[in-house]
Image (tube, grey):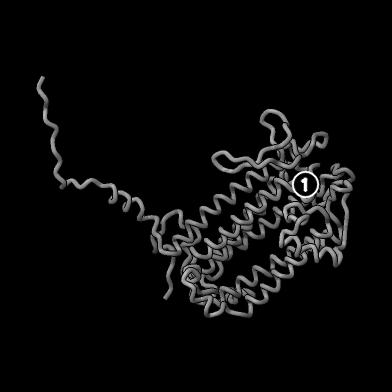
Amino acid sequence: MESSIENQNYPWYAGNSRLIEPSVSGRWLAAHILQAAIIMFWVGLNTLSELQVFDPDVAMYEQGLVLIPHMAAEGIGVGPGGVVMDTFPYFAIAFVHWVASLVLLFGGYYHLAVGPSDLSKGGRGNTKRFAFDWDDPKQLGYILGNHLLFIGFASILFAGWIISHGIYDPTIGEVHAVTPTAENFTHIYQYGWSTPGFNPFFIDNLGDLAAGHILIGLFDMLGGIWHINVAPFSWEQQLGARRDNYSADGLIGLSLGGVAIMGFISAYFCAVNTFVYPVEFYGAALEVKFNVAPYFKDSVELGDGVFSSRAWLSNVTYYVGFYCLQGHLFHSLRAMGVKFENLPQALGAAFKIESSQPTEAAQPTGE
């Protein structure tokens, strides 16, 4: 029997978590594709916006730029000393992202309005293989495995860029390619155990950076292959908390929790690491402060109302992670049965003064 989200009464804030029926799994896919389209469009638009105001005679980090410093740090368009030699690659990258956003937009529209709303009924290519049911952990593991394969491939691709093209190395002030050695791979385990001198937030050489991405990429791809072929173990499926995760709210809650953790790590890493985020592009390392909430402050005064690219990036990333954490709590609690739409009524009942309860009238006092 087919069902549709149109005949259900969902609150506006339910978002993608309302896509709970297998009969609307196509919309779940469409939502993900359209979200990717928005991200691609944002990157293209903001890169062009930054190019419009970019002044090569002013320090990059004083211009409030975020995307151009990223591309410069990856060794694109820069020469010795981090001087921008050519801005055309930035324009080309923006254009490619816009084209990609259009392709994704049409893909999202296809799965929203043209393709089957129930992926189990098939479609073009291998669409049917990505149909899922919340009561089928093996199929959910299959989809997770494919995600891990793509993440692992992207990580190895970045390592390949370091090896073949190189990224900006602030220790020598040039774009530098490097091939990691066996020693670099052994360093990764020292970073993992926070061995003195191997703080992962202060990595300071390209060899370790490339080796880390290769190892992480391989682990992700091995994990992807594992989840594609092996269903979650029965003991793991019996965990009460895990059963709650096999739902739209549970999946979104877990995803937002992961994004929140990555946001907090990225914010601090950007704030203190001057190798991956060179001073030439992002400004000096930041100071960690606390007021109502933690925040990152420039350690070098740049003038009234002027903040470095590092300060913008670290603080925005931190607060995006913070709000993702709130989303994680919201959706995870919904997955465990909390009905937020009933809170106003419940609170009203809790604080309601019973009209039937007799009250004593104030007696007038004589003068």
Nearest the camera: 67 or 201?
Answer: 201
**Image-quadrant location for residue 108:** bottom right
Which quarter shows the N terminus? bottom left
* Residue 220 image position (x, y, % from top left): 69, 69
* Residue 65 image position (x, y, % from top left): 72, 41
Seen in the image, is 273 located left or right of residue 27? right
Nearest the camera: 10 or 70?
Answer: 70
Nearest the camera: 73 or 289?
Answer: 289
Residue at horizontal 79 percent and vertical 46 percent from the top: 278
Seen in the image, is 200 located left or right of residue 16? right
Asked whether residue 109 is in view, the answer is: yes
Quick check: 195 above or below 53?
A: below
Quick check: 133 above or below 207?
A: below
| Within-10-Å neighbours for mark 1: few <14, some 14–19, many 20+ | many
Seen in the image, is 349 located left or right of residue 289? left
SS state under label 1:
loop
Quick check: 328 above or below 313?
A: below
Nearest the camera: 106 or 76?
Answer: 76
As drawn, the residue found furthest toward the top would be 367
Residue at horizontal 38 percent and vertical 55 percent from the top: 341
As drawn, the residue found furthest toward the left would be 366
Asked whether residue 49 is in view, the answer is: no
Total numbered circles: 1
Q: What residue did someone put label 1 on?
A: 274
* Residue 290 image position (x, y, % from top left): 59, 40
**Image-quadrant location for residue 142:** bottom right
Residue at horizontal 71 percent and vertical 43 percent from the top: 310
Residue at horizontal 40 percent and vertical 55 percent from the top: 340
Which quarter shows the C terminus? top left
* Residue 28 image position (x, y, % from top left): 54, 65
At label 1, the amino acid type is: Thr
